Image (tube, rainbow, N blue to C red):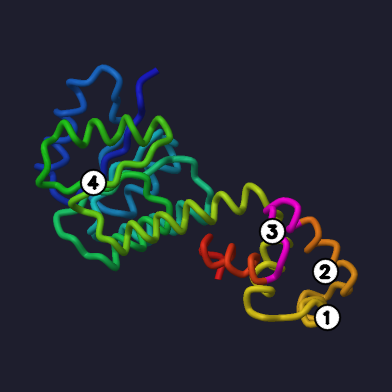
Amino acid sequence: MPITLVIADDHPLILDAMENLFRLEKDLKVVARCLDGDEALKAVRRHKPDILVLDIQMPAKDSLVVLREMRKEQLPTRVVVLTATLDEEGLTEAVRLGVRGLVLKELAPKLLVQCIRKVHAGELWLEKRSVSSALERLLQRETARNEAAQLLSPREIEIIKQVAAGLRNMEIGKKLFISEGTVKMHLHNIYQKLGVDSRTKLARYAQEKGLV
């Protein structure tokens, strides 16, 4: 089965170039091409492609709006973003919203093909020249948060946040509308899962994993 693609860019020439590029690859298939963000979102909803290749700057519906809508609707399509400029704030937000690939338009076309394959395989592709130290830190924090979410329940994560904020058990119970005994039970389970034995170590864990 080929990797299905929706490609979105407001320049027809770039769309033509991408479509011609992907046509040469037997494992890639373009199912829709879009000139603005609104079209891109509709195409993703309709075709449910494996990958959306999205220009970071789109008319009608901004690319970040498209990403927020996709996240809100829990659409499974993975996103590769194309960018001509390095707007740190916009790129950071894109990564926060779940973008799995980031490619500069000036790079060789073969790198875009490689990126799509890597992202489809579940990997990240963040071209080093387009990733600032801030983005790298954000990515590390997002990875750490995901690791914590797999290990801990939402209630346990909330309690860790309150411990890191300096609240005592009684205060945490009042804030979360649970008994102090229930807080103690959760903390016991948390300590066992994380292999820590003090509130100080638990607060340090929260900081390292970006939970606070």
Mark 2 vs mark 1: which is more N-terminal?
1
Q: Describe the element under mark 3 as helix, strand or loop.
A: loop
Distance Cα–Cα, label 3 vs label 1: 21 Å
Mark 3 vs mark 1, foreground winner is 3
Mark 1 vs mark 4, foreground winner is 1
Q: What residue type is labelled 3?
A: Val
What residue is pinned by disc 1? 170
Mark 3 vs mark 4: which is more N-terminal?
4
User: Can you tell which mark lies on residue 183?
Assistant: 2
Q: Describe the element under mark 2 as helix, strand or loop.
A: helix
Q: Which amino acid does label 4 sit on?
A: Glu
Q: What residue type is labelled 1?
A: Met
What residue is pinned by disc 3? 196
Q: Describe the element under mark 4 as helix, strand or loop.
A: loop
What residue is pinned by disc 4? 127
Give the mark count: 4
Query: In which quadrant will I find the N terminus?
Result: top left
Distance Cα–Cα, label 2 vs label 1: 8 Å
Residue at 14% x, 47% y is 105
Residue 54: x and y, percent? 28, 47
Label 2: few (<14), some (14–19) or many (≥20) C-alpha neighbours in 10 Å: many
Residue 152: x and y, percent? 68, 53
Q: Is residue 61 visible to the viewer in this orientation of the structure?
A: no
For the magenta stretch, what is the residue range?
190-199
Mark 1 vs mark 4: which is more N-terminal?
4
Q: What residue type is labelled 2?
A: Val
